[in-house]
Amino acid sequence: MKRKALIIVENQSVPPDTRVLKEARSLYANGYEVTVLCPRREGWPQGHQMVDGIRVYRHPMPREGHTPIGYLWEYGCALFWELLYTWWIYLRHGFHVIQGCNPPDDIFLIVLPFKLLGVKYIFDHHDASPELYLSKSGKKKFLCQLLLWLEKMTYHFSDTVMVTNKSYKDLATDRGRVGSDDVFIVRNGPDPQTFNAAHPNPAVKGGKRYLIGYVGCMNIQDGLDILVEVAQHIKNLGRRDIGFACVGGGPELAKLKKMVKDKGLVDMVNFTGIVPDREMLEILSTADVCVNPDRPCEMNDISTMIKIMEYMALGKPIVQFDSKEGRFSAQEASLYANKTDQVADFASKILWLLERPDERMRMGEFGRRRVEKELAWEHSVENLLAAYERAFSKRTRSADSRWHRHVQKCDQGRNTMTTLSVSTDTAHVSADDGDEDGSRLPYVLITPARNEEAFIEKTIESVIRQTVLPLKWVIVDDGSTDRTSEIVSHHIAHYPWIEMVQMPHRRDRSFAAKVQAFNAGYERVRDVPYEIIGNLDGDISFEKDHFEFLVGKFAMDPILGVAGTVFREEGYSSDRDSFEGHNHVAGQCQFFRRQCWEQVGGYIPHRAGGIDWMAVTTARMIGWKTESFREKWFFHYRRLGTAERSVVSSLFSYGKKDYYLGGHPVWELFRVAYRVAKPPFIVGGLALGLGYCWAFLRRVPRPVSRELMAFHRQEQMHKLQAIIKSLVKLKRIDNFNVHRLSI
């Protein structure tokens, strides 16, 4: 299943926002399904458009604000439309991750309800909003404090953060308290595939000998008024052979044109407005020098301007004011004007370059090489994809801390399960060394494992310490990207009955893929003379006689088809907190009699899950006994269903699964009511019910037969009757044995 991404950007439309367009194209090229939500702007009035395979939706937008009230109106309207469109896109197309591109920093408000459904949030930090506000107003007012708070909340609710440079990464780690591993520098370099030099056109110079080029926005902080003053200064020096071409649009464009007219510079300075890319490239390719007159301020000092790299990609020498990130980007491709004597020094730098063609050529060539080798967009794609992978790999912070605390307690309290001792007094018996009475049936194990480096060591240690060992244990490394295979390989050298099969790398983690991995392991044991086959997850641990106990149960009961034990997680016990009951065997450790396994047809692949449930329930339907035993238990380190999702998201998915596995709606109402009183309180139950309703409304195809669904619903109604009888009689309900009460 393709991962689906929604990119929300407010302050520019797409494709004009070239950074967002490059990000979307790169994600699409790497297998993502991408939707972009942006405002309608001049030249881009279409409400919906397909751009290179990317869905682009454009919402209505008021005029850009210039006052505090204007900003609030602009952002408030945008927030309303973004929320409306986002829900519509979710219902129509779906998405697994939202990438929010600032300014402003309020997009996290849209994301919050979706995070409850397991959607990840990636903050793409384009501009430092508090500094941007100060660059426009110059005053630290209430609005600035509000922007700082919004920025803080954005950082807090982000799974990962993408930034354009090191200065912004420092903001995220210092001011935002984001972990360094969660911040990725994705520089906004030009794409050589689409941003190429055009043939110079002398007509663009308008009869002038030299042309100074600029491309970018026309905002207060962009310093175009300074550039107009520079042009006047040069004209006052008697130079009539130099022209200025400024490409782009923005709220200050009308004022700048009036300023040019008032100063008598119409014959020298041309503000073209927004023009087609071809015309823009022609102007810049014809220019002798390109400029970046961004007004010296904290905002511009820490920001990386795409126009700098675009000038460099075209091999143009640059003049700009000295700034931290501007100097990092351009290095020797630029001259740096003094911030104090702004107009005169900027003008002198331009004139100095115009008089030295060799120096212009040297600087231009340096810039072009730097872009090709370091700053082009292709060098940023790896970090873009890494940011997404990091977001998908994370569980919620609270869940992470809970697991960490529990694992520490388990390690302190269960040394026998976490310490491997080769010299032990316990006798290990192989399954093929069975007693004459047949109490030890030979068995094999198969473990599909994907990215289990955190826990698989505990599983391996538990197995190799068993009092009755398997004939063979096949661990299938299902395209792991961590150290799973390395950990397994270390143990294979010491235990020849362990074998590893490595599957090719794949992007997603799905239950259908897990079945494919299991079947790859199954091929390795087909010719082994086993009587019992076990499916074992790579994130559990158990006592040393666990398998001897289960194999013994099969030996004592010839109609026992599937067996297992109860399991525990942090704050959860399957025999106490679930109504699955004693006849359901959890999929993390599931043992089948060979004849039963072959009759049910093994695991049936289905991307959404329920594969182990279908096998166990089918076995029971065709007459086999299935049993979970309370006498033993295993510990499951990863919360069920949260391998790549939050707890609430997993509950939403379980609600959907309840529907497509044929669960009775009356039983589901009971489940929701019961789950509301369990952590996470209220939200968990609502997520479960919403998942069921969601699948019902979308008519999700059911992978189960009519016979299996009828059998399943009959069992559910029997259990519900038993529960109601117990409540009426004021008797304590034994969740684990409720099915026995209904018989």
Image (spheres, rainbow, N blue to C red):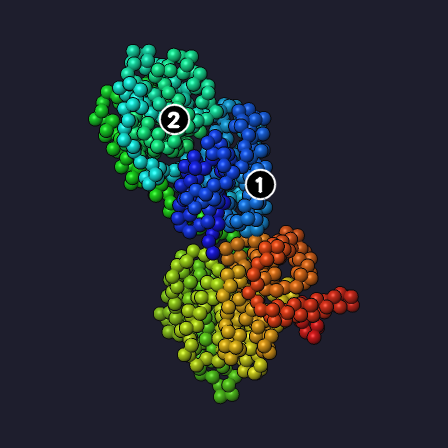
Q: Quadrant of residue 715?
A: bottom right
Asked if 623 appears above or below 578 in the picture, the reply is below
Left or right, 22 with reference to 354: right
* Disc 1: CA contacts within 10 A as few (<14), some (14-19) or many (>=20): some
Q: Position of residue 721 (x, y in %)?
A: 72, 68
* Disc 2: CA contacts within 10 A as few (<14), some (14-19) or many (>=20): many
Name the outermost residue toward the bottom.
436
> Given the image, on which type of amino acid does mark 2 rest?
Val
Image mark for residue 83:
1
- Residue depicted at x 45% and y 22%: 253
Q: Is residue 657 visible?
A: yes
Q: Could you tell which of marks 1 and 2 lies nearer the N-terminus?
A: 1
Q: Position of residue 618 (x, y in %)?
A: 57, 72
- Residue depicted at x 52% and y 84%: 439
The answer for how far apart the CA atoms under marks 1 and 2 are is 33 Å
Asked if 361 appears above or below 735 in the picture, the reply is above
In the image, 300 versus 207, the foreground residue is 207
Left or right, 371 with reference to 553: left
Q: Which residue is mark 2?
A: 247
Q: Position of residue 658 (x, y in %)?
A: 61, 61
- Residue depicted at x 58% and y 33%: 76
Asked if 729 appears above or below 39 in the picture, the reply is below
- Kindly state the secondary structure of the residue where label 2 is placed: strand
Left or right, 116 with reference to 369: right
In the image, 334 versus 693, the foreground residue is 693
In the image, 312 versus 322, the foreground residue is 312
Q: Is residue 390 visible?
A: no
State the quadrant of the C terminus.
bottom right
- Residue depicted at x 57% and y 57%: 653
